[in-house]
Image: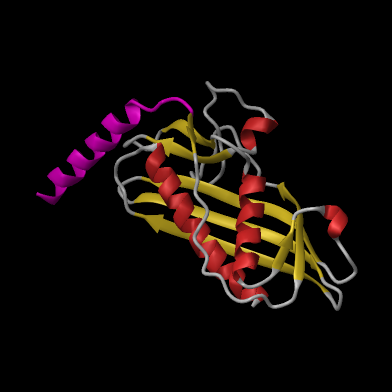
Amino acid sequence: MRRLAVVLMAMTLVVSGCAMLNRSEMTVALPEVESRALIGKEVYVGTIVDRRVFEDRPRNASTPSLDPKQENTPEIRVRAIGRLRSGYGNAIGDVVLKEGTVETLTADAIRQTLTGLGYTVIMDKDQITENTIVIEGTVDKFWSWVVMMTGFRAGIKTSLDVRSPDRNRIVETEIITVTCPGYIISPVNTVRCVEQALQEYVDELKKDFE
């Protein structure tokens, strides 16, 4: 009976995946963050650079890759958030952000986290003073993938250069692997897993700025 269930599940993955062989443009929502009282600290989040490395045919599904039948440019790669796979484990369509990039999405998540912690986030670089905390950094991992018979997974890693009036430090935050239920291979489940990873990323980032 268990073997039959596994076969039926694989058939579901194949059928669902075959209808989505192309690129999907999706929107990812930022996590909700509970707001605290202002703490009297001002912060500016500057450039966040995408440092992810893409491969054409990676051996590991967790390595970023794009559908070879679709456009593959730096402008597309910075929007890419995941890759779909069929029930047989074959890579099929990819998922990219409809608007914005992984860089802007990550920067917005950082700003929202700091705002929730009571920091005053300024958006204009010209407003930076000697008391402003300035944050810049890199996105080293931001990807969702499919594990056959398991579901979706996602991971996020950033390295932030935090320059404060009293000290400078590097804040590295990593969500190694988030496992999300969902056996229907669809870009919707990719987004749900990315959003779950973002929530865990924000929760972890809070600990470094509280």
Q: Position of residue 110 (x, y in %)?
A: 64, 60
Say which residue appears at 66% left-offset and 59% top-offset. 111
The residue sitting at the right extreme is 130
Quadrant (top left/top right/bottom left/bottom right) for the C terminus = bottom right
Prevailing secondary structure of the magenta residues: helix
Q: Residue furthest front?
A: 37
Looking at the image, what colour scheme do you see?
secondary structure
Task: Establish if 146 lies above or below 99.
Answer: below
- Residue visible at 54% across and 23% down in the picture: 70
Image quarter for residue 43? bottom right
Residue 13 in magenta stretch: yes
Front-most of 196 and 173? Answer: 196
Is 115 in front, or is 166? 115
The x, y position of residue 162, in whole percent, is 78, 67
Q: Quadrant of residue 121?
A: bottom right
Q: Is residue 181 magenta?
A: no
